[in-house]
Image: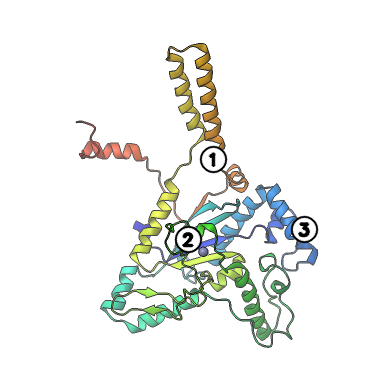
Amino acid sequence: MFITEGIPSFFVTINPADIYNPVLNVVAGADIDVDNLCPHDISYDRQTRLVANNPVVPAKFFNLWVKKFISEVLAYDPEHKDLEGGILGVCKGYYGCVECQGRGTLHQHMLVWVHGALSPNKMKERISKLKDENFCEKLKAFLDDTISTHVPPLPEQFEQDTPVPSSKHHPCAVRGPSLDLPTEEYERARQADLHYLVEKCQTHEHKKTCWKHCKAGQAKSCRFGLDPSNITPETIIDMETGEITLQHLEGMINNYCEVIMESVRCNVDIKPVLSGAVAKALSFYFTDYITKSPLKAHVAYAALETAVKKMGELDLKADDKMVLKRLLQKCANAMISQQELAGPEVASHLLGLEDHFTSHTFNNLYWTSFEHAIEKQDPSPECSTKS
Ligand SMILES: [Zn+2]
């Protein structure tokens, strides 16, 4: 896709809130109206048990949520007839891989390609070579409008209004304000709702994994770059170097897009791809993720079968053979049992649901035969086995 569509414009992460989202109950068969939830429809305890006891439900919910994000928020049109586009512009392609977090929740990392977007090199040219100030203003306005980095304040005169559902319940467990409210009150309610939503979902809490790249004796710094002191009051575009530094108003608030946040009602992350280095890092990350193959049970057993056969050929005493057999059995059990798979991941696979989401179709490339063919045509000293 990098070759046919160019460099993607955004890297988006969505962590659907399976233990809160009321739609999960609908997927589980509950007869509830998600737009008019009654207090007894909301139970964190009941929903957490449901998710833990039946991994099919969070797997189906996740699949539905990501598909709706693609069709309604990105508004990707497979026929490329829709010129209005979605929240990030007219989406011309996407590629997202499904990952499983430590506690077993599925989440999605996605690259998004937008029609008409300039590559980092072209942007740099417009900024530092052509000194196009009008372009810089527009780019800055677009970035600041798309990416937010602070908790919006509660609106003034908000006390007299009808309370928004997210002020009383977890913001991921309820819908946004009613569309039936008068325009001015609706705008205030929307801001209040976003305040609660961002505060709950986007405030970063350092965990052990934040420091995993820090060396002993060095000052600790969060690998996500989040720290109360990491503040950039406004987006800076350097006219000399073409470098773009995004504004970051609150150091512990993760990047988000307001409309995406209001639509998916869960923790999100959004990063624009503004430099060639970031594009390269993302391409490496996705290729590495797609091509890494976990140890398959049948491969492990095949290897052990060969070992057992070889053992039979050895001239050993019966007792020694028994000891070796037990050792091999233990190795086999350890190899299989050490693979950690979460319930929703297994359920998703058994249900035949997508392990990645993409707008494009791909052909398989059988690497070993491909490499052999190349080697035959053009032998290289590195690959040659002849001495
Ligand atoms: Zn951190």
**Along the viewing direction, whichever of 102 and 69 lies nearer the viewer:** 102
Between circles 2 and 1, the one closer to the viewer is: 1
The C terminus lies in quadrant: top left
Q: Earlier in the sequence, mark 1 or mark 3?
A: 3
3D distance between C-alphas at marks 1 and 3 = 38 Å
Q: Which quarter of the figure has residue 215?
A: bottom left
Q: Which mark is residue 339?
A: 1
- At horizontal 31% and vertical 78% (from top left) the residue drawn is 127
Q: Is residue 220 above or below residue 149?
A: above
In this orientation, which residue lies closer to the viewer: 310 or 117? 310
Q: Quadrant of residue 93?
A: bottom left
- The local crowd at label 1, few if under 14, some if 14 to 19, many if 20 or more residues have their Cα within 10 Å, is few
Closer to the chain start, of discs 3 and 2, is: 3
Q: Closer to the observer: label 3 or label 2? A: 3
Depth check: 298 or 81 in front?
298
The dot on residue 31 is 3
- Three-letter amino acid code at the position of disc 3: Asp
**Is any part of residue 75 visible from this angle?**
no
Callout in the foreground (1, 3): 1
* In the image, farthest residue toward the front: 217
Give the residue pinned by disc 2. Answer: 79
* Quadrant in which the N terminus is drawn: bottom left
Mark 3 lies on a secondary structure that is loop
- Report, in whole angstroms, how far the alpha carbon at label 2 lies from the one at label 1: 41 Å
Q: Position of residue 378 (x, y in %)?
A: 20, 40
Q: Secondary structure at mark 1?
A: loop
Q: Residue at x 50, y 28 (%)?
A: 301
The amino acid sitting under disc 2 is: Glu
Percent x, y for residue 164? 71, 76
- Dot 2, how many residues are within 10 Å of its Cα: few (below 14), some (14-19), or many (20+)? few
Residue 352 picture quarter: top right
User: Which label was assigned to residue 26?
Assistant: none
